[in-house]
Structures are given as C-alpha cells and as structure tokens.
Image (cartoon, grey):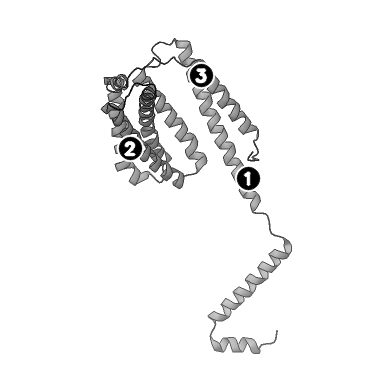
C-alpha cells in the first residue's frame, strides 16, 4: 500500500519476527484466572516485585538527575533506558487496569476499590514520563538507532517484570522456557535487521537525490564564482588601484 521496497535484509527480518512471534505464542504460559483487582494488588505488593519496583525508581531518578544532563545527548542508552524502565511499570499497571475494567464490564464492579484508581494514576504517570524521554531520544538520535535499542530494552524489562509479578514461568518446563527465549531473540534480531534495512534504504535514497551537476551548470557556477571573487577582490582594493587596473589594456 505504501509502495515501499523490501530488500533481502528486510525480508529476512520479517521472517525472523514472524517466526519468533509464532514460537512465543505456541510456548506461552497459561494465565491464571483473576477474579478481583485486589489479587493483582497482592501480586504487586509481594517482596520480589517491590524490590524490582524500588530498583527501577532508583535507576530512573539516577538517570534523570545525574546522567541525562551530562551525557543524555551523547549516549542513546540514557533516554531509552528511562523509557524502558518506566515502560515495564506501565505495562504491569495497564494489565492490572485492563483486568479491572474487564471485570467491571462483566458485572463485578472494581471501580469501588482504591487499587483500581491507583493503577490508573501509575499508568498516566509512567506514560507521560515515557513519551517525554522517547521524544527526546528521537529528536537527538537517529530513529534507526533508537527503535531497535528501545524495543530490546523495553521488551526485556517487561518480560522480567511480568515474570516477577505474575510468576508466568512457575508451571512451565525447561524446554518451553528455552523455546520462548529463542523466539524472543529471533524477534529482536529481526527487528534490528528491519531497522538496518530501513536505514540503508534511507541512505541510498538520500545519496540519489544529490546527482552530479551537468557540465553546463558546472561551468555557469564556476563562471559566477569567478566573477564574484573578482568583485570581492576589487572591493578590497583602494580607489587608486582600481583606476590603474582599468587603464591597463587587457
């Protein structure tokens, strides 16, 4: 529809992304049924996830207050790190909020619980911080560099947070976990290849726009520059030198 050309590197990236996604879906763990938002709150307040939450907050504050002013515009990992860390918390909060809304629509009102509104506040806060620093990263660095790094860090931290909070891998065997990791690595590699292909296409199209000048145009520009240099040289001379040069025969 967009009439974009997909070269061999892009095709390989698409195949790897699709294959990795299929592997992840096939070996994905079964979600345990949740009947109340208070169950999610109990998962969010367990000791392991509170330790992860405290680590994320400390790292984000450190990145914002110390590293961002000093090397935020030279190191792409600073802004993308802030986005990825906050993004992992926003995904957990969105899952909790979505479950609460789903139960509410099914007739089990969850809006009466304070935990639902707290998760809504966390979602709004995390999304605002995340989008702010993502825009800074895209304004400072090349999109082909930011996109794969952000995707890898964001997805990795989200999986870690989900494993800690929801304990997705507790009922799985080693083979399923290894298959999921292999599928995840395939998706990451495919994403990097797609962005590399896009960057190379952009570079080739940019070089194509600057075609060499024709001989006639080059001669005209050279003559114009020569006349300009001659005019500047005359401006630098004194009036007496100019009169003497005009009296000399060519």
Q: Which class describes the residues within 10 Å of circle 2: few (<14), some (14-19), or many (20+)?
A: few
Query: Is tag 1's residue or tag 2's residue first in the polypeptide sequence?
Result: 2
Look at mark 1 in the image and give the residue it sits on: 204
Measure the C-alpha gap from mark 3 to mark 1: 37 Å
Look at mark 2 in the image and give the residue it sits on: 125
Quadrant of the snapshot with the C terminus = bottom right
Q: Residue at x 52, y 26 (%)?
A: 187
Image spot of residue 53 (x, y percent): 30, 28
Look at mark 3 in the image and give the residue it sits on: 25
Indicate which label's residue lies in the foreground, 1 or 2. 2
Image spot of residue 172 (x, y percent): 43, 11
Residue 55 visible somewhere in the drawing: no
Camera-side residue of 226 and 31: 31
Above or below: residue 235 compared with residue 243: above
Q: Which class describes the residues within 10 Å of circle 1: few (<14), some (14-19), or many (20+)?
A: few
Quadrant of the snapshot with the N terminus = top right
| Left or right, 62 with reference to 232 | left
Hey, which residue is sitting farthest front in the picture? 107
Q: Secondary structure at mark 3?
A: helix
Q: Residue at x 32, y 36 (%)?
A: 60
| Left or right, 34 with reference to 243 | left
Image spot of residue 15 (x, y percent): 60, 26
Image-quadrant location for residue 116: top left
Above or below: residue 2 compared with residue 96: below
Q: Secondary structure at mark 1?
A: helix
């Amino acid at each position: 529809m967009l009439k974009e050309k997909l070269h061999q590197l892009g095709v390989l990236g698409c195949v790897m992304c699709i294959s990795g996604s299929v592997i992840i879906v096939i070996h994905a763990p079964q979600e345990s049924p949740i009947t109340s938002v208070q169950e999610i709150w109990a998962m969010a307040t367990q000791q392991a996830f509170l330790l992860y939450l405290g680590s994320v907050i400390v790292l984000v504050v450190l990145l914002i207050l110390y590293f961002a002013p000093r090397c935020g515009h030279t190191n792409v990992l600073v802004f993308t790190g802030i986005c990825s860390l906050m993004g992992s918390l926003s995904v957990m909060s969105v899952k909790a909020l979505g479950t609460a809304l789903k139960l509410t629509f099914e007739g089990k009102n969850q809006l009466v619980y304070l935990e639902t509104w707290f998760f809504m506040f966390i979602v709004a806060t995390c999304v605002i911080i995340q989008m702010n620093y993502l825009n800074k990263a895209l304004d400072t660095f090349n999109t082909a560099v930011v996109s794969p790094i952000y995707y890898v860090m964001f997805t990795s931290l989200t999986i870690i947070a989900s494993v800690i909070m929801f304990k997705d891998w507790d009922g799985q065997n080693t083979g399923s976990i290894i298959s999921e990791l292999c599928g995840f690595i395939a998706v990451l590699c495919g994403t990097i290849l797609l962005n590399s292909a896009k960057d190379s296409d952009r570079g080739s199209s940019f070089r194509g726009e600057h075609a060499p000048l024709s001989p006639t145009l080059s001669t005209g520009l050279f003559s114009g520059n020569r006349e300009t240099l001659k005019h500047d040289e005359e401006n630098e001379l004194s009036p007496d030198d100019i009169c003497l040069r005009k009296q000399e025969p060519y």
